[in-house]
Amino acid sequence: DGGITQSPKYLFRKEGQNVTLSCEQNLNHDAMYWYRQDPGQGLRLIYYSQIVNDFQKGDIAEGYSVSREKKESFPLTVTSAQKNPTAFYLCASQTLGMGTEAFFGQGTRLTVV
Amino acid sequence: AQTVTQSQPEMSVQEAETVTLSCTYDTSESDYYLFWYKQPPSRQMILVIRQEAYKQQNATENRFSVNFQKAAKSFSLKISDSQLGDAAMYFCASPEGIQGAQKLVFGQGTRLTINP
């Protein structure tokens, strides 16, 4: 089954810790994205990547880092510099080109304890 | 910067009735697409319908259709014969960029409740 998989579903972080959210896709998509979702707000773009070993900052990249060493994988690290990391995080992938559908994972709920 | 606005935080409709969700947007692109995504309780976003700005005919997917008014920059979603499974958050979205990665700009969302 082709799709996009995020893990874990729930993640708890202590103050000052870095945590990494996993995102894997087997759709052979070139583009991958990380979005953050807060209550009452739409999704906001954190980082995106169009090709292996290249990625770009989105609107709210501060306190986050990513890597794209393989086409299938785009992990997101939430660093201790992110002051308010509690949120729902969604990963998406897409073929390049206008109007193509973005496919989303099931998300990771991150909570700071 | 591109903006997408959904002015209805919540909507409700009786089962089998019709409901319309509103969306306005602002873009500097000459050709673009617009999307409606659905986020059910499982929280996985699913594409409902898409519209290319150059096409005059409004897009339709079964019970879902759009009313696209380009001059007014309005892109509403009509759901006919509402079903309990339609209950979800609905997001209007517009991609930023013409080539390469299509970074989606989302509205704030509308929570749709279906009353049996």
Image: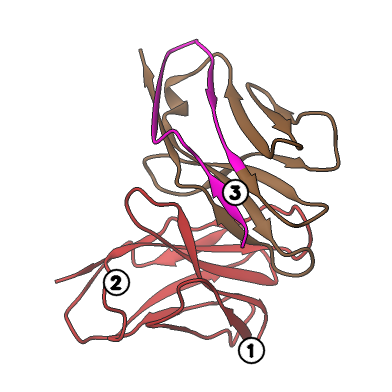
Chain colours: A red, B brown
**Residue contact at pointers 2 and 3, CB within 8 angstroms:** no
Distance of label 2 from label 3 (alpha carbons): 24 Å
Q: Are the residues under marks 3 and 1 on the same chain?
A: no
Residue A3 lies, in percent from the top left, at 57, 58
Q: Which residue is mark 1?
A: A53
Give me the chain letter of mark 1.
Answer: A
* Nearer the observer, A56 or B108: B108
Q: Which residue is mark 2?
A: A85
* Nearer the observer, B84 or B34: B34
**Residue contact at pointers 2 and 1, CB within 8 angstroms:** no
Which quadrant holds the C terminus of chain B? top left
Horizontal relation, residue A74 to residue A20: left or right:
right
SS category of the residue bearing label 1: loop
Q: Is residue A109 visible?
A: no
Distance of label 3 from label 1 (alpha carbons): 27 Å
Residue B78 lies, in percent from the top left, at 60, 23
Q: Residue furthest left?
A: A113
How many other residues sit within 10 Å of disc 3, few (<14), some (14-19) or many (≥20)?
A: many
Horizontal relation, residue B75 to residue A89: left or right:
right
* Mark number, residue B93: 3
Q: Residue at x 41, y 59 (%)?
A: A107
**Residue contact at pointers 3 and 1, CB within 8 angstroms:** no
Q: Is residue A13 visible?
A: yes
Distance of label 2 from label 1 (alpha carbons): 25 Å
Q: Residue at x 50, y 10 (%)?
A: B17
Please give the range of residues in magenta.
Answer: B1-24
Horizontal relation, residue A1 to residue A111: left or right:
right
Q: Residue furthest front?
A: B72
